[in-house]
Amino acid sequence: MIRWPSRILLPAILAAAVHAAPDLKDIPTYQLGLDALGGRLWEVAASRFEAALKEEDLTPELRASILLRLAEARIRGGQPDLALETLADPDIADHPDRPFWHAQALAAAGRFQEAIDAFEAIDAKDSHRTEIALTQALLERAIGDSRAALSTLDSILSLPKPPATARLLKAEILLGEDSPEDALKALPPTQGLSAADQRVADLVKARALLALGQADEAAPIFLDLTAAPENQTLENHHKAYIGLAEARMKLGSIEPAADGLLAFIQKNPNSPLLNEAFTLLLQCLPEQPAPNDPILTRLRDWAPSAPGRGITMSSIEDGAAHGWPLPTPPATPLGPASLFYLALGVKKEDSPTSPFEAQLLLTRLRLEFPNHQLVPRALLEAGRWHLEEGRRQRATACFESLNRLGQASPPELRAQGLTLEAGALFAEGQFDEAADLFDEAADLLEDDRRQSARLNAATSLLAAGDVAAFDQLDGKTEDPWLQSQLALERALHLTSVRSPDALPALLAFIQQYPDHPRMPEARLSTALAALDASPAKPDVAEKQLNALSPDQQQSLSSGLLALARIRLHERRGNWKESAQEAQELLGTLEEGPLRNTIRYEQGKALFQNKDYNDARLVLEALIQDAPDSPQAPAALLLSARAAAEGGTPQSQSESLELFDQLIDSDSDFHEVARLEKADLLIRLSRLEEAVETLAPWFKEMEDDDPLILSIGLLLGDALFAHAQGQTSVLEQAVEVYDRLLGVLPDDSPVRARILYQKGLALEQFPGRESDALKTYTDVVDSAVGTNRNDWKSIELCGFSALRILEKREEWAAAKKLASRIAELKGPRSEEASDRAKQLGLEHMIWDD
């Protein structure tokens, strides 16, 4: 709630009073009104001015002067609406002082923005210029626009002799904006201030010193202010008590601070700063207070007695009111607050019953004092505690009760409840539900907090993978800052799911928001996305990394920056440099996920650089040190490959053992390991073992399995090599190839390779050479007039068919086939053309 700051406003109005015109001195009631106005008797002054308006033969000018004084009396007497009615009189419409008093009436009526607009419309040369600016600054401060208030005050302070009150007000505003050092500089000399303003200046000075960590200098000022309440408002006098306690706490004098607060609360149970005093008092408690701690004991003394025997309480969660008798408690001002803050204190106790007792105290507050201002906070704290203890349903009940309070519950508290529940839902993976609650919380907040809630809602939608809903939310956002944040979050989400749209989105963000504070993060993410793109774009990555200034690099994770440079080396095939940079970085990184990633990248770089033994040492150390890390399965696979490439029987045997470890695990790599183990067995000529590994697997596999082609080709190769003329084994090989051909589409580039392998198998059958020949020639015929990328297999089929024809001495057919192969314009077309010419010459075969 905004409260009107009257401390400076009222003197400003009095200073602006219009002097009586010569003709007005003859009106006694008007003179009596002026006397009452000067004596701060507002109602008397108003009645006298009303009587003056009834005088006969008043000229419009005289009437306007009396109306102005009547408006002033009503403004100062707390009747701004009547003042506005007075100022609406036609006789005063053109009076030069009317705009000033009209603006003052709007301010007194709480119509702050209208008042500010009215003040700004007044001519800068107006005689009330200083009063106008001071009042306008107060209004701007009251509506939370401190920047505008400071600007208005600066316009006064630029005058030759600015009023000291302007400097004092500026110091107060700067202190409220967390600029204590500037506030101290802005304070005016106390000699030019009234006694009341001197005390305000003392309070500002003490609070600024405290904020700057100079509690030893602040404490004596606070102590002096508490000892002499004269010339202080009640609120400022109480602020001095609060400041004194804070200063003592910062100086380590916890016990004096607590004693002072207890005495203050006892003496001032209706203080406007009661909650601040209780909050500080709880900070004086030890981390785990004993049940008989003096502070908790005093809180128990202040709290109302619990209802008597016979009480039943079925549950301490919301909705349990039916089990609790509701007597009317005695009207003790400290009772409700003591229940609330006692609950917070008891919660800190390290005992099995303290959580229950704390919840019980909050429930008593809600049931015994249902209309107290602390009830919403009690519901919020109860819900928070339920969440901490894993009782989300009870927490939800508390937060729903908080929302049902409606206007009785401050929007900020309702938003906190929604945010807490949304965070719990997010942690449980219920992202869509979390997004709804974050969005609902945003509607209750303003400014930066609203934007943060909207951003949380958007992040939840992205976590749910609901990019369409995210885009709808983005489309409804008008705030430029939030739009930029959403654009970046969307791009980062696309990066996390390795979307091909990630890199364009990040580049668009960089171009559209070049001065965004999160630009370093965006550039680093862009570099990593460019390196992960298909195909990789190392030049884009390098440009983004080079664009980072030294200061920007300092704001980023040095490990992630190094990881980007390591991957840049990888994408350019600089494996040696990649491994070296990884080694340098590992010397500076502590154990953790990033270190494991860098160790894996180092092992991969060594493997690609054919440093197989070193690669195994790095990768197997990673597996041993972090067996449960996400990199461990991939490291085991790469280590097995490195052992397979080692070239010695021992390393190849170790490779098979490593593959077996991965096969027996539940890793996503276990099928790849099974496949690569079979490939190694074939390379080691352990063909029977390879067939035993692959054949059952291939048989059980569905036709749409993504591994069917790789497994089928390996199995066919193993069977063909193992056949040694055994017809039954060759038949198994042909069956494998036929199944693959039935699964693949007609335009698959792998068909030619499979048909070539099938042809080789058919050649091994007695009497099936013609079937092999047809298989080969069909491949050549299907390639005529097409653009193919499987020339190797096509031409192998062609030359195999040519070999059979030449063996059969079918020279004319052989020459014709060689010419067809040449016409395909493949890599071996010239060789086929030469062979066709040679066959023609050797066997005198002439073209028609």
Image: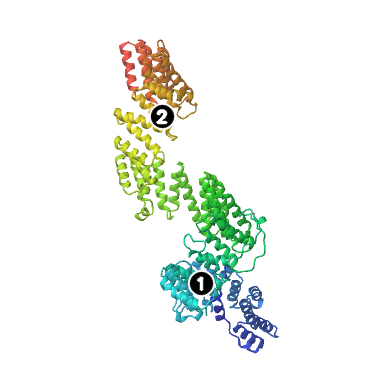
- Foreground of the two, 613 or 310: 310
Q: Residues within 10 Å of mark 1 (few under 14, many from 20)?
A: many
In this rendering, the answer to whether 633 lies above or below 696 is below
The residue under label 1 is 239
Secondary structure under tag 1 reads helix
The residue depicted at 31 percent of the width and 38 percent of the height is 617
Classify the position of the N terminus by image quarter. Answer: bottom right
Looking at the image, which residue sits at the far bottom? 26
Side (left or right) of 767 relative to 144: left
Q: Is residue 152 above or below residue 524?
A: below
Q: Say which of 232 and 109 sits in front.
A: 232
- Judging from the image, the colouring scheme is rainbow
Which quadrant, please, contains the C terminus?
top left
Label 1 amino acid? Answer: Lys
Q: Mark 2, residues whose alpha carbon is within 10 Å: few (<14), some, or many (≥20)?
A: many
Q: Quadrant of residue 189?
A: bottom left
Residue at 46% x, 81% y: name it.
192
Q: Residue furthest front?
A: 309
* Residue 444: x %, y % from top left: 58, 57
Position of residue 164 measured from the top left corner of the image (x, y, whole percent): 47, 78
